Image (cartoon, helix red, strand yellow):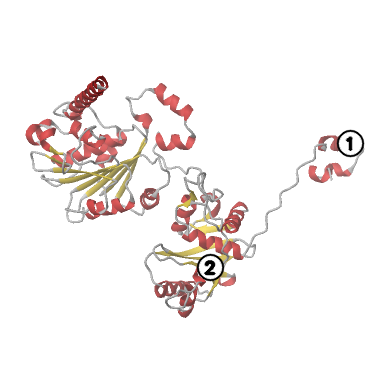
Amino acid sequence: MATNLQAESHDLREVQMRRYLLRQQLLAAVTDNPDLVVQPTADQLAFHQSGAQGRVISGGNRSGKTWCGAREAMWWLLGTHPYRDTPKPPIAGRVVAAERMQLGREDPVPPTRAMMAYWLPRGTLRGNHWDKAYSATSNVLHLTNGSILEFMSHDQADKAQAGDKRHFVWWDEEPPRSKFDEGLMRLLDESGAWWMTYTPAEGMTWSYFDLYEPWSHGDTPSLDWIILETEDNPTLSPATLANLRELMGDEVLRARLKGQFVTFGGLIYPQWEREKHVWPEDEPLPFDLRDVPTFAVIDPGIGAPTAVVWFAIDKDGHLWAFDIYYEKDRVIAQVAEAILATNSRYKITPRYLIDPAASQRTLESGRSVQMLYAEQGVSAAPAAKAWQPRVDQVREYLRQEKFHMLSSLRPLEREFMSYRRSKRWAAMVGDPSGRPLTEGDDHALDCVGYMCMARPLPAKPIAPKPGPFAYETLVRQYRGGDPAFLKPVHEATT
């Protein structure tokens, strides 16, 4: 027994020694001027030179995105930024990373702290050493010029991420949306800047729809977006990269190596394609809304957004979604007022459909949501409830390319692109109604489903395939001069 305890104690001392040596290597500044050792690439330079208030680097793994974030933070803290005017020190900055923060525990050194230990010259640290400048209890780094850098984590509560004003916030990897919003509020007093460095490994998350999409449409002039590719890192082996390409799927490669947003499998509506189903908002509809049947479909929300989608049906039976109301924390009177105002703007009198759950009366008032809308001048009929038939009808409209939507309906486009089976799909079943576990919002999609169920589309017939003896039949018809030879194959073999 004593021998075993001695062996375990010896092993523990070895582990502690290895950690100590590694920590000393990471914490020691390699040079008084790291810029002389590592020069930014052209794309990294574009990030540093951008004057936008908010900047995002979506990069592949090992593409140098965290290097950029740390180098930018160093320049801000020291007041030595070579490409943009920054406030004079002392500066108060914040880093919010995916790494877990544990008060009083410093080993192993998390990546963002290791990066800052590399970039900050030793003479700029209070006491000329990281151990004296960094407080493991408050997770704050102190510099000799009075600047501080606060280290936080994605897993900390929103309230913990409140606090004092900051001159900049750097998110290393994509944070939850609530953490992002909390960080932005810390920048108000100083009109501060922010940047995010991450790999979009989870596909099209909130940052794609709330940041990238508006930026790509030119709607956010205060934001700049830079994409870094792993292959641009000169320190990586080409042979290793080639091996990764052989082992990984196309979607994973685009996300992990090129920093691109991809749609991973499991979408509920994989038939939806922007090129086929989205109509440019600056082009007029191919019909007059006053000459065709119109509908307004309502999906009420309490904690979730209330969605109202307006539809028109053209002479060929195609379904057109041409407007949307998508707001959270609105009472029924406000939603009804917006519905009537939209109807007046288009000079239409649509028929109304509503989520069937809205017909259920509450015990307190004895009235239903459907009745409350009727009192506001919006009398809606309950839509079909079953989830799977609803999904099947939407898929059929998409497959036959009889569904169209204006490009201005961004919430609906977002839901088409992100509504998917849950990661627990294979391990668990859905509720008794037949609805499986899903991820992503579906408020506007429910409106589409209710509308498609109200106007069910017959399945498109599939042309019969030629029989197994089509070739022999054609040869006989040709030799006998049979005029059926000129018919299509499937007709000639009947």
Image position, residue 314 (x, y; %): 61, 65
Q: Is residue 307 left or right of residue 62?
A: right
Q: Quadrant of the C terminus?
A: top right
Q: Is residue 177 visible?
A: yes
Residue 120, picture quadrant: top left
Give the labeled residue for mark 2: 356
The numbered dot on residue 331 is none
Mark before the other along the chain sequence, 1 or 2 = 2
Q: Quadrant of residue 365?
A: bottom left
Q: Nearer the viewer, mark 1 or mark 2?
A: 2
Cβ atoms at labels 1 and 2 below 8 Å apart: no
Determine which residue is flagged by label 1. Answer: 476
Please tell me whether mark 1 sits on a helix, a strand or a loop.
Answer: helix
What SS does tag 2 mark?
Answer: helix
For the residue carrying disc 1, how many other residues have a C-alpha within 10 Å: few (<14), some (14-19), or many (20+)? few
Q: Position of residue 469 (x, y in %)?
A: 83, 36
Q: Residue at x 20, y 56 (%)?
A: 188
Q: Is residue 394 left or right of residue 171?
A: right
Specify the quadrant that holds the N terminus.
Answer: top left
Q: Is residue 374 left or right of residue 452?
A: left
User: How many marks can you see?
Assistant: 2
The x, y position of residue 202, in whole percent, is: 41, 43
* Residue 232 in picture, x, y percent from top left: 35, 30
Residue extending farthest front: 1
Give whichever of 184, 368 is nearer the camera. Answer: 368
Q: Residues within 10 Å of mark 2 (few under 14, many from 20)?
A: some
Which amino acid lies under the numbered mark 1 shown in the image of this protein?
Answer: Arg
Query: CA–CA distance between discs 1 and 2?
Result: 61 Å
